[in-house]
Image: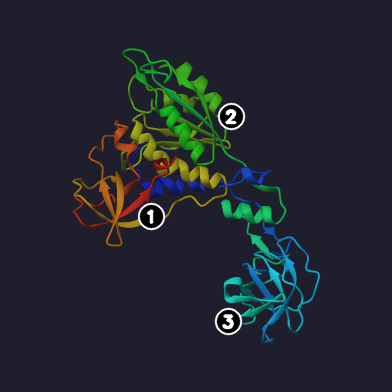
Amino acid sequence: MASSLIPVDEARARILRLINPLTREEVQIAEALGRSVTDPIVARRTLPPWDNSAMDGYAVRTADAGPRRVIEKIFAGDTPKHEVVAGTCARIMTGAQLPRGADAVVMQEKTKVLEGGLVELVEAPKPGANVRRRGEDVVEGALLFPAGRELGLGDAGALWGQGLERVFVRRRPRVSIVSSGDELCDVGAVVEGKIVDSNSPVIAAAVRSAGGLATQVGRAADSLESTSALFGQGLESDVLITLAGASVGEKDFTKEALTSLGVEIDFWKVAMKPGKPLAFGRKGDTIVFGLPGNPVSAMVTFEIFVRPALRVLQGLAPFPTALPARAAAAIARQPGLRHFVRATWEVRGGELWAIPLASQSSGALSSASGATCLIDIPEASGNVEIGSHCQLLPVAWAGA
């Protein structure tokens, strides 16, 4: 285990090298949104199953000229009864099957109804006009989605359109969360002189937003016995997240408890601000994150390290795309640590501008609650000037 500070990218690489996607499970498609399919999905139906009309109008033969006699009216769901031959047409509604003989649809606004059941075209159509061709969407036997596809709402619609009800996806990671500290009390039982434990429910919500199944195992008292007991329960999950207790104080037992339980700790500190006291290790198939006790530090380290790990466990790409931007205010800093500055963003003249929040205290939740992104400042960078280029990392907690 390295005792010195390690760079953010190295820490993240070490974490992701040790993670493999979880096993698969079959779920209802409604439960598969945001999850990764484990097998290629092949279309079993051709869609549309036949040529159909893209609008309300008349199905015609483009080779004809002059008025045409309407031979039938076709609604969506109907099977056409007649063939369109020379001098005829069919009244047709959007989505209805094109009758034999017709090769175009003329919208009703470009026709004139005459006496005797005749229709005159105001504008001559081209072959294929306003027609959705059979198989235009997908053809039976074609690859619908490759393995690893993260399913969105449109994807779910495509699966339902194939008549599918269930699909195989990676199972959700089971995540146990353990906080520690005699100074804390529960959200629903505020005690004078105590600090409300907001970290546990916040990180549990973050886990759920990342697709995990969160369990708040409990809050350890400031003793090795209590800490070890709760950590032992948490190690039965896919992921154990500990909160606080990772410093070197007389009542900080996280490190000792994890070690006594057989957790192999890979690193203990990362060269970043906020969030330097971050631990990572594993025992068997369970991966362990020791997050800082400061609320904002816990949230930032979750975004930078834990969320990517939970996504990889689910067979998903680990990172969101970093966005180029400009700094809307100066940021004073010393080189040495990679800095993640809470900020909001807005568009000015077609460019993204990052606006740092006034408070950057790692202990103040107000410095995170309004943030929509993090400004990612490299270790070697000094002061950030107004208008200088920077990188933005969107944070999931903005919409969680």
Does residue 365 lie above or below 58 as drawn?
A: above
Report the residue at 40% width, 33% height from top.
291
| Viewer-side residue, 322 vs 346 | 346
Estimate how packed mark 1 is, as few (under 14), some (14 to 19) or many (20 or more) residues with alpha carbons within 10 Å.
Answer: some
Q: Mark 3 points at which residue?
A: 123
The answer to whether marks 3 and 1 mark residues whose Cβ atoms lie closer than 8 Å is no
Front position in the image: 314 or 50: 50
Amino acid at pointer 3 = Glu
Residue identifier under label 2: 236
**Amino acid type, callout 2:** Glu
Q: Give the SS element for disc 1.
A: loop
Q: Is residue 174 above or below residue 72?
A: above
Is residue 255 visible to us here? no
- Inter-mark Cα distance, 1 to 2: 34 Å
Disc 1: which residue = 322
The amino acid type of the residue labelled 1 equals Ala
116 with respect to 223 (left or right): right
Q: Compared with residue 57, is residue 290 higher up or lower down, i.e. above or below?
A: above
Residue 386 placement (x, y as % from top left):
19, 54
